Image: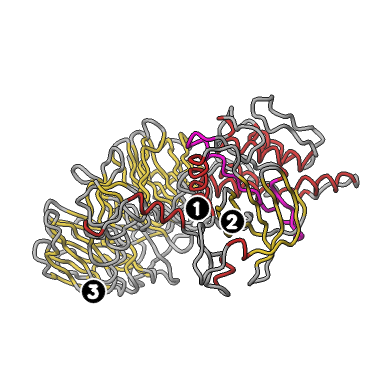
Amino acid sequence: MKVCSECGKEVDSSFKFCPYCFTDFAPEDEEKNLEEIDSIQAEEEETPEEEDESNNNTSNSFGSSSNEVRFSDKYILEEPLACSATGTVCIVRHYKNDRLYILKDFRIVNKTKEEREIIGDRLMKTTNALKRLQHNNLSCVIDSDFENDTFSVIYEYQTGKSVLDHIEEIRLKSDKPSKEKVIKWAESIVEILVFFQQNQKRPFCCCNMLPYSFVITDNEDIKYINIGMPIFYKEIGIDNPFEERPLLDSEISPKYDIYCAGLTLLYIISGIQASSDPRLPVPEIPKNADVPELHPIIKKMLNIYHALIAPSELLEEIRNIGKPKEEKKEEIKEEKCDWSIYLGNSERTNAFGNHPTPFLKLNWSIMVGPSSRFYIQPAENALTVLSDKGNLYLLNFTKAQLIKRYVLNINAVPPVTDGKIMYINSATGQTAVDFEKNEPLWDFRTKSMFLTPPNITDKTIMTISYDGFMVQVNPLDGKPVSMESLKGKVMAPVIFDSSRLYIPTLSHGLLAVNRETRIVEWEVKASSFTSPVSLSNGKVYAGDGAGNVYCVEAHSGRVIWTSSIKGAVVHGPVISENMAISSSAMGQIVAMNKDTGETLWKIDFASKSNPVFCVSDKYLFLTSPEHTILTANTENGTIYRQIKLKGKANSIPLVYKGRLYCSSDEGEIYSFTPRED
């Protein structure tokens, strides 16, 4: 085993790259000792963003050279704000960019030399991580220094008053903040919770999200200005030297941050400053408190130790305040369908006659939340619906019933299900969800983007990144077992057979890679491949960004035929009996003879669109630009219009156990039952 010098992960000694950050490993005789690397990193300090434009000579954390400006010389005291036995808080001005900042320094006292070194090292590494946190509602960490047992942090300066002072001042005037302002502040506070707890690799615990930690700015926005770092002391067995009392275990958790944020909102709507001790009874919200719509949400936050709820769900509830509630749906009535006489081929009339019966009947629908794209797949005894933002819904596939919801907070791509486990790729790594245990099984995070679905092989989960790295992970624990570097950027799904991987790339055409030797056996030079690839009877079918569809002999790479479609291929070729069916970004769907490439039929939409489809029992179910699901006969391409969706269709239709499932960007999932013959 060896350790990556970039991310610190331990990996197999045979790896030439780190599968977590994709850093090249240096030759063995050039690798540095991990402790040496850690000491160097601990001494590094990032320059304030504002300073980059005007000053390149900055100090590091533990000293300076003759060409550097020491930390203490960079900031000029403007105004002291607070002073205690352990530190001070001041407004300072940067000597170069002339901007104001907040300086907090802490003197580490009553500790041994060894403890002071541990604390200083930990603080510097922590603040280096904090400098990367950027959010509109956060007063960001800009700079830091540790010298002579004093730790100093520079924060963004925010004009205005603390929530404590602002609300007290309003209520002394027998006034109250407007409902719109309070809801806006509540949304901003919960956005910070989502950012810390659900958008980071691990939850970040602040432990002080109380009224004094927030500022109402001159623009009446709310900003969090007091990022705490007590969790790190607990991790190394040293009490936080900057707190008046020791922190309880119950206070060092994401739940405590939600609890404190609830106390802040309670103070805003009522003026009551309740104790932050979670061991005391949960504070009651007065019935006459402002903004009654927020009361149920604040109660959930204050009862977080009894009933868990994700910050993203709280945020969704706040954003729904004031929106008109949807009326209860009446009994679903069959729509009068606007049947098309023809679509595409003007010489072909509708084969179903002038008054056909609807081919599909709406069985049920359920709202799960808006999304730009959904991926619908079957699981064991259920149906899974994954949004591209990472919300995963487990549905009863016979009726509109939500079994379970997971909040994964990843930019997801189409998942793959293997029995009771779903493997999900994203822009940040890979996640496995165990449906039997009702929880995520493991999470494999990297710096590279995985824009294609994973592949389940014999013993591993194979994943190819956008940068062309192939990583194979253990399906039980998510740890990488092998990796290779392949040429070409990959955005389209990869397929494989017993001997080869068939990889569509953006710059190197279609590649066939030997599964054992990883040698490229053949390649088809073409424009960028961005659509899925199909494999049938020893032939590979692929479409490229220039509208070309290829049929290639799998073992030799010989191109058997090529055909064309109007616009870049976005879906397919899908093999159905004797046809290869593809759709394009120009709204065209073409069926070609899979052996000769001859065009059998076409469907053209008047507007540009990206129609997607599935094939089942000689019928093609496809989306249209008019927000409807269409049915086409695959024998001749004749189609007619179906039930209109609420919003734009945003999933590939799925036929499962005799039903058709699809979704809209409004967040509604539909179940259709085909007509009975």
Mark 1 residue element: helix
Above or below 154: residue 252: above
Above or below 470: residue 309: above
Q: Which residue is the site of mark 1?
A: 129
Residue lying at 68% horizontally and 25% vertically, measured from the top left: 280
Q: Which residue is the site of mark 3?
A: 526
In the image, 62: left or right of 636? right
User: Can residue 463 be seen by looking at this rendering?
Assistant: yes
- The x and y percentages for residue 595 are 14, 65
Quadrant where the N terminus is found in the figure:
top left
- The x and y percentages for residue 209 are 65, 42
Residue lying at 62% horizontally and 43% vertically, measured from the top left: 317
Chain-order first, disc 2 or disc 1: 1
Query: What span is colored magenta in the figure?
Result: 213-238
For the residue carrying disc 3, how many other residues have a C-alpha within 10 Å: few (<14), some (14-19), or many (20+)? Answer: some
Residue 141 is marked as 2
Q: Which of 541 and 331 is in front in this view?
A: 541
Q: In the rendered structure, which amino acid carries the disc numbered 2?
A: Val
In the image, 663: left or right of 560? right
Q: In the rendered structure, which amino acid carries the disc numbered 1?
A: Ala
- The x and y percentages for residue 578 are 18, 59
Q: How far apart are marks 1 and 3 (CA)?
A: 43 Å
Q: Which quarter of the picture shows residue 530?
A: bottom left
Q: In the rendered structure, which amino acid carries the disc numbered 3?
A: Ala
State which mark lies toward you, 1 or 3.
1
Mark 3 residue element: loop
Chain-order first, disc 1 or disc 3: 1
